[in-house]
Image (tube, rainbow, N blue to C red):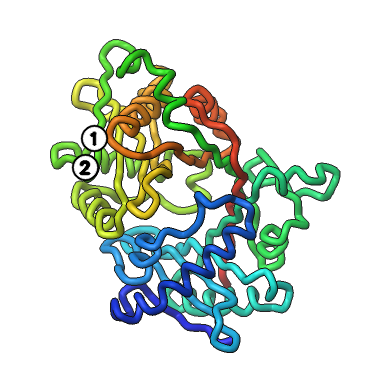
Amino acid sequence: MEITHIPAGSRSATDIDALLPEVLDFDTLINRDSGLGQDFDPLPGEVRGRLLNPGEYTTTQTWIGRLDGKIVASGIAYLSLQDNLHVADVWCAVAPEHRRRGRGAELLESMEVSLRAEGRTQLTSYCEIPPSARDADPRGPNLAAESGAGSLPVDLPGVAFLIRHGFDFKQLERCSVAQTATAASLAPGDSVDLDPGYSIETWNGPTPAHRREQIAMLHQRMSTDTPGSAEFGEEESWDAARVAALDAQREAKGERLHTALALRGESAAGFTEVAHFDDRPEIGWQGSTLVAKDHRGHGLGAALKIANHVALGESSEVERVYTWNAVENSWMLAINDVAGFATWAWVGLWKKRLA
């Protein structure tokens, strides 16, 4: 198999535009085989941006495996450029008709050699599984997550591949979906009841300049305050400049952000984000959600999500939103239930240390 390594920004726009249809076709094939549904098909703007534009704080690298000129395998690494410089978040896939022939192992080995040479000694990865696959045979052998909550059948191809190649199963996440109209109908009128002293602001697009420091603080807290965060990386460093850079990167690839920020006076208490893409405006993807520890117990999590969904209904074409949460995070799962979310898929989170 011929493997080509493409760090973001290493090829011209002309070269990437010529390659893009092949990559999109392959990624669509992999998603349809997964059973997750058309909402998860690749987005042209996002894939083009991933291949063409390195970010100031994060970047990606792509590996493409070909046989007789045709793409049969692909891998991606997501890399932070400011913190957690020893970590790479990786994913790889092989066309169904080429599986169990060592293609995935060959691709992963090539990725590991390159990443290890750059000092990336910790790999994180994931596998996405529809409920029908996870629950098909509850009597079969399962592997428990090291978090102590949830398990996955060891015979599923993605699970078996990660086990075979030295990854440890750290955490199980629930992927859920909600209709924005459902969440909006739970709010009285266009507002959400809040404890005295709290307020919620919403906006569409880049973070207003006067809110960047508050959003930066909450992003930094995300790297330490979410369940299992210590397993997958160290505390991140955020400031207003990093928030502005992330907003610019999103705009460049056609990603539109909708944010709700909870405040107590002028102190940031929590936030939630939903993104959608110009390529598929009816689908929203839940971004970060956090209520700071010293502001929990006031119903802010559900209030933030409902307020953001109300704003989505008023200012976008988004019809449904997908979100991901660790299964041991019963507090956030309860919030999602209140906000109208229902289980769509399961996601295993994995970690491997390179020698």
Residue 101 position, x and y percent, is: 72, 78
**Residue drawn at point x = 48 percent, y = 40 percent:** 323
User: Amino acid under label 1?
Assistant: Trp
- x 41%, y 77%: residue: 19
Residue 7: image x %, image y %?
Answer: 38, 75
In the image, residue 82 above or below residue 131: below
For the residues carrying marks 2 and 1, which lies nearer the camera in this image? 1
Residue at 65 percent across and 78 percent down: it is 103
Q: Residue furthest right?
A: 139
How many labels, in total?
A: 2
Residue 291 bears which disc, if any? none
Q: Is residue 250 left or right of residue 289?
A: left
Crowdedness near tag 1: few (<14), some (14–19) or many (≥20) residues, C-alpha within 10 Å: some
Kindly identify which residue carries mark 1: 203
Picture coordinates of residue 144, whole percent (x, y) = 72, 46
Q: Amino acid at mark 2?
A: Thr
Q: Indicate the position of residue 45 as horizontal and vertical percent values.
A: 35, 61
Q: Secondary structure at mark 2?
A: loop
Q: Nearer the viewer, residue 136 or 154?
A: 136
Foreground of the two, 304 or 283:
283
Q: Is label 1 in a helix, a strand or a loop?
A: strand
Quarter of the C terminus within the rendering: bottom right
Looking at the picture, tell me which residue is in the foreground, 289 or 144: 289
Which residue is labeled 2 in the image? 207
Quadrant location of residue 165? bottom right
Tell me whether circle 2 and circle 1 mark residues in contact (CB < 8 Å).
yes
Which residue is located at x 65 percent, y 47 percent? Answer: 130
Q: Residues within 10 Å of mark 2 (few under 14, many from 20)?
A: some
Quarter of the figure with the N terminus? bottom right
Which quadrant of the figure has residue 342? top right
